Amino acid sequence: MADGIPLPDGPGFLSRAPELAALESLLRDARTGRGGALVLRGDAGIGKTALLERAVAAVPGPRRLRARGIGTDALPYGALHELCEPVLAAAETLPEPQREAVEVVFALRDGRRPEPSRLGLAVRALLAAGRPAVCLVDDAHALDPDSARVLAFAARRARTAPVAFLFAGRDEPGLRHFAGLPAHRLDGLGRDDAAALFGSRFRLPLDERVRDRLVDESRGNPGAVLEAQREAATEPTGGYAPPPGPPPDLDPRALPARTRRLLLLAAAEPLGDPALLWKAAALLGIGTDAAAPAEEAGLLHLGARVLFAHPRLRSSVHAAAAPADRRAAHAALAEATARTDPDRRAWHRAQSVVAPDEAVAAELEASVPRARARGGLAAAGAFLGRAAALTPDPARRAARALTAARLQLGAGNPETASSLLATATAGPLDVRGRALAALLAARLGLRTGRCGDAVAPLLAAARDLAPHDRPRAREACLDALAAGLVAGRLGEHPLTRAARAATGGEPGRHPADLLLDAIGRQLTRGHAAAAPHLRTAVDAFLAAPDGRDHLSAWLACGAATDLWDDGAWRALAERQLAAAHRTGARGVLPLALRQLALAHVHAGEFDDAAALVAEARATTDPWNVTAPLLADLVLTAWRGDGERLDRLTGTAARVARDRGHGQLLSVLDHATSVLHNGAGRYETALRSARRAARHDDPGLHAFVPSEVVEAAVRAGRPELAEPVMDLLVERTRAAGTGWADGIGLRSRALLTAGPGAEDLFREAIHALERTRAVPQLARTRLLYGEWLRREARRGDARAQLRRAHETLASIGAAGFAARAARELAACGDRPARPGATPLERLTPQETRIALLVADGATSKEAARELFLSPRTVDAHLRNIFRKLGLTSRRQLRDLKPQLPASKVG
């Protein structure tokens, strides 16, 4: 998106309700044959593109054609060609004069340049050819003039064609071509909406006063809100210092010296508190007249809060100042800061000194708990890291730097952590300190090396820590086990070493101890022997206070899926994510987001999963790119998007090879099998599923085997499913959950010949109806419907296939929905078109019955009229009530004016 504004369902759209309603109305008109045009005007970042995308998503059906202005480098008719290129083949259907105009402009034939009016009419006809269309033209102010004139001409005459023209652009001269068209100007969001937008995507700890200042400085521009949000998320002090960033175009150097000093004070004071600013200014001898030049230049606004014209201007002013000037500003702010805010006072004081000073360092260290409560791990690490830099005693400096390094690594700042670790290891450390330093070095190495290579140093750190710090030794052993699991098929030897270490000795009663022992047993003794221990560990995590052990909760989520317990999986994922947000643990945030995204995919909540994947991509560092990638692979496969999965496959293969990430290859094989099972390409699905099953990665036990069974049976090679089926039966029976029972029964049904399969399908459906597994329930209905059709029971098959298709289409499982649609067509039925309203989803027969009953007919009367049995009419009525969400015939009578009578023939 050009504007880079919020997710389609995020905050910020409440202020846009009138514009959104106008856009959706225009698109609905185009869908019924009446076109039109609308121009959205507004500043960069104001949300024009996001609003267009939201409206288009809300009104499915029309073909979407896109173009974008690119400014002075554009070729004549360049944007017009971009817009029309997908439908150029339809030019053959145009009248000869119009066809000639189009083909000459697009260099498909020689000829004189056509008149703009003839070309405009030709373009309107071309865009409307075949089916309704919506033309999305972004950055319309930057279109090449030839394209702008033609598109404006076509848009003014769109009322008689099924084409909607939506233009978005800034108030610049290029937008004059669209004068006279209906237009809406987008202004900034209201403050509440801007604050909600900031909070929707930034959930790490941040001082509320800093948050308020960032929101106010954005002035309601969603793009500026999100930019401030991104800077706050990557700022390593938790809001105590201006984040680094490139300076904007505004330049304060031409201002008077006293004004520049005032700007520096304002930049160093992150709260935007005018009273504090003027108190500090007075200490430096700066009068109130110093503000006028900055205000006149548009750099600073002084009101209830001190606001810069651009969020990054604060950073650039602070970075450009001479070190001595920065220290003087912080010294004044430290003296001016009330003693009721001791942590900010300590921070400013620490920035004002150069030489080591134990009193200042101790004051910073004492402020760490308060800083952590306000700004999370990053703020705590920043305070302690600065304290270490100001500590005269080498041993104390090394200890403080080591703790600060651990905090910064947990906050997702590996570069800062590495620098602090170097400081720590340069000083004298005791035995425990050296072991902790080795653990941190191994964790940092995991970010740059191959996964399996990290196992040995992590196990060594665990061994050295065990006599001195059992909790940290447990963390190291869990890290080693996690590294081995991630290495998977590309690191079997390291995984075996980690598994043996995990099961050595009697486990403690701490949840992480129990999990370590359980996964170790799973790897060394098999799932059946480990299942009771996995259950104990998962229950211990569920019973632990919120936020406890969130560093290892993602491993507990994997254990919950191997136990087929989707309730525990979802609960643990939600708790881990909440704890990571609350504490600012950006190091584990992508892992928590990945687990919750996968849980949403499992529940058929694909849009929610996509939002979590996007957040994971935005908050991860290059090392952890696998976390969002794993979830994206599975989500993309379920959505049936083969082109996107092909692109992701190349990335996944490269990352797996470079990082030794064997688990990623298994997830890729699983995702590929889901995609091809949905598309009905069973041989391809079978190859991928068998490859994933061969390695039997923990965390995938509940997902891979059923894909093997379905692909093998549908490919006509059921014998290849037998070994996997034996394992699946063993694991699902031991689990005893609805999810396990449903998948196990469905897989047995696929391998059962004759009428015995029907009972198994019915039992599977009943079991899955008690779970969160909406997509799997729909797939089971699809498989049952396919079986019924092959048994020549077309009426029963249609009932199952319709329900399967409705669910799969509504959640966005396009591949499986298309498969269900093909099966319905083979039964002589047709599914409702995508985006249809509940009334439009009624079949012609259901519509006839609904109209008769709405007129007061009884079931018997309707049956006589339509030559059906009363029982069949009642069955149709149940479907009608379910589709429309009704409970009585009286409600149906109230809907009669809206019933689609045109479907009755």
Image (cartoon, rainbow, N blue to C red):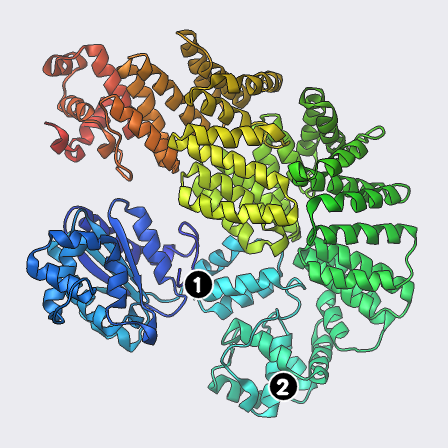
Q: Amino acid at mark 2?
A: Arg
Which x, y percent locates residue 878?
28, 20
Which x, y percent locates residue 416?
71, 63
Give the class, few, some or many, for how many residues have Cα within 10 Å of label 1's Cα (few <14, many ≥20).
many
Question: Is residue 129 found left or right of 383 in the rendered image?
Answer: left
The disc, 1 or 2, on the residue closer to the chain's N-terminal end is 1
Q: Amino acid at mark 1?
A: Pro
Q: Check the picture and name the quadrant holding the N terminus.
A: bottom left
Which x, y percent locates residue 151?
20, 65
Residue 237 in view, yes or no: yes
Q: Residue at x 22, y 13 (%)?
A: 872
Location of mark 1 (residue): 222
Q: Quadrant of residue 18?
A: bottom left
**Mark 2 secondary-structure assignment:** helix
| Observer-nearest of 328 and 2 | 2
Residue 156 in view, yes or no: no
Question: What separation in Å lies between label 1 and label 2 (alpha carbons)?
Answer: 31 Å
Which x, y percent locates residue 98?
10, 60
Location of mark 2 (residue): 261
| Observer-nearest of 44 and 420 | 420
Does 246 sit above or below residue 778?
A: below
Question: Is residue 408 found left or right of 162 in the rendered image?
Answer: right
Q: Quadrant of residue 464?
A: top right
Question: Is residue 746 found left or right of 167 in the rendered image?
Answer: right
Instruction: Specify the farthest residue to the bottom.
Output: 256
Instruction: Specify the farthest residue to the left.
Output: 96
Q: Are marks 1 and 2 in contact (CB under 8 Å)?
A: no
Q: Check the picture and name the quadrant holding the C terminus.
A: top left
Question: Is residue 89 found left or right of 264 in the rendered image?
Answer: left
Instruction: Specify the farthest residue to the top.
Output: 755
Does 683 sit above or below residue 381?
A: above
